[in-house]
């Protein structure tokens, strides 16, 4: 279970002319591993999973696992607002060799606590792979409460949660109610450091796309109990964390990687649009001040 620890990257999916840029994705993964990222998360929110076809989703997961080649864990995003579709995507991830599956709470449907529990229980019983729950109410319209998380934590292959509520009170309650070995990873770069301080194990990060070494440093220092150094590293990186959310994620992250020369095109897929000129100016200012461009 402890393999889900440290700074994981919610890696972007690069596109060229609307198609997945496979070489660009491979290059990004190499960049991440060379700079100390603890694990790779393809097909999450940052990977624009909502607008990938099933064929593309499968290919991105397969390509990620092949490129990583066992050097770090791969936690594949396999969630959907359909339980049967979630099972299909999770079965594929297991067959492809993923180390675990990151499964979002069903969006748009707005299931009840019992519906959430039954959804995750059904998936966990259908596919014997380590599952990390993903709670991100700002994206889904439903908040998975700590009591429901604790119920899910009693299922043997549900091993952790990515908590993106940015609510340290709720995160504390999750940690308090769940077994000691249950993994709690921050889903917000801003709350990664305090989440570790209250018992979390790491972060699944957007900022790691552009500054993997510095994000990893914050988490490694915090996990080692070196909080003064971790705090210093947090505030150094804070302007870049903020810049990654000038617009809806992953628009700024993809544009940043293009500006840094890491991918050929930072264009997102519709309905996400290109970054506005005003925000592009702000983004360039922050990236330049930090020394990334």
Image: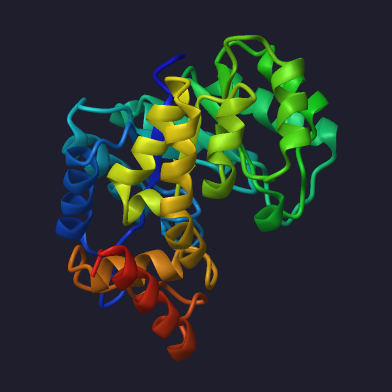
**Can the viewer see residue 6?**
no
Depth check, front residue: 279 or 13: 279
The answer to whether one can see residue 255 in this image is yes
Report whether 101 appears left or right of 133: left
Residue 167 spot, x, y in % from top left: 73, 42
Look at the picture and state if 49 lies above or below 144.
Answer: below
Q: Is residue 78 left or right of residue 160?
A: left
Query: Relative to 232, does residue 121 appear above or below in the rendering?
Result: above
In the image: residue 261, left or right of residue 241: left
Instruction: Name the quadrant containing residue 153.
Output: top right
Quadrant location, the C terminus: bottom left
Whole-percent x and y of residue 207?
A: 41, 53
Name the residue rendered at 44%, 80% in the picture. Answer: 282
Residue in the foreground of this view, choosing between 2 and 288: 288
Residue positioned 33% across, 27% down in the render: 95
Q: Which residue: 16% across, 53% down?
A: 27
Residue 79 in the image, given as x and y percentages of width and height: 55, 42
Task: Describe residue 212's horizontal placement relative to residue 163 as left or right.
Answer: left
Q: Position of residue 168 (x, y in %)?
A: 72, 37
Q: Quadrant of residue 30?
A: top left
Q: Nearer the viewer, residue 107 or 203?
A: 203
Of all residues, the one furthest to the front in this rendering is 228
Compared with residue 258, is residue 63 higher up or lower down, i.e. above or below?
above
Toward the bottom, the furthest residue is 277
Q: Residue at x 63, y 39 (%)?
A: 83
Residue 265: name its quadrant: bottom left
């Amino acid at each position: 279970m402890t393999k889900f620890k440290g700074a994981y990257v919610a890696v972007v999916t690069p596109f060229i002319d609307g198609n997945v840029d496979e070489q660009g994705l491979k290059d990004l993964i190499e960049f991440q591993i060379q700079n100390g990222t603890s694990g790779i998360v393809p097909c999450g929110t940052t990977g624009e999973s909502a607008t990938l076809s099933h064929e593309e989703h499968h290919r991105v997961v397969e390509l990620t696992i092949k490129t990583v080649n066992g050097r770090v864990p791969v936690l594949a995003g396999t969630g959907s607002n359909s339980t049967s579709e979630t099972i299909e995507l999770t079965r594929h991830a297991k067959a492809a060799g993923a180390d675990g599956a990151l499964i979002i709470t069903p969006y748009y449907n707005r299931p009840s606590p019992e519906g959430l529990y039954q959804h995750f229980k059904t998936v966990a019983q259908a596919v014997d792979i380590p599952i990390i729950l993903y709670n991100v109410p700002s994206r889904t319209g439903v908040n998975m409460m700590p009591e429901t998380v604790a119920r899910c934590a009693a299922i043997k292959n549900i091993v952790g949660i990515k908590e993106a509520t940015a609510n340290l009170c709720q995160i504390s309650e999750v940690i308090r109610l769940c077994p000691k070995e249950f993994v709690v990873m921050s889903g917000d770069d801003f709350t990664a450091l305090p989440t570790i301080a209250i018992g979390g194990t790491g972060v699944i990060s957007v900022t790691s796309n552009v500054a993997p070494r510095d994000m990893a440093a914050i988490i490694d220092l915090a996990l080692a109990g070196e909080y003064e150094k971790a705090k210093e590293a947090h505030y150094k990186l804070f302007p870049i964390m903020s810049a990654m959310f000038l617009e809806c994620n992953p628009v700024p992250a993809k544009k940043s990687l293009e500006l840094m020369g890491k991918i050929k095109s930072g264009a997102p897929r519709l309905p996400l649009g290109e970054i506005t000129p005003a925000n592009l100016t702000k983004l360039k200012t922050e990236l330049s001040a930090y020394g990334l461009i």
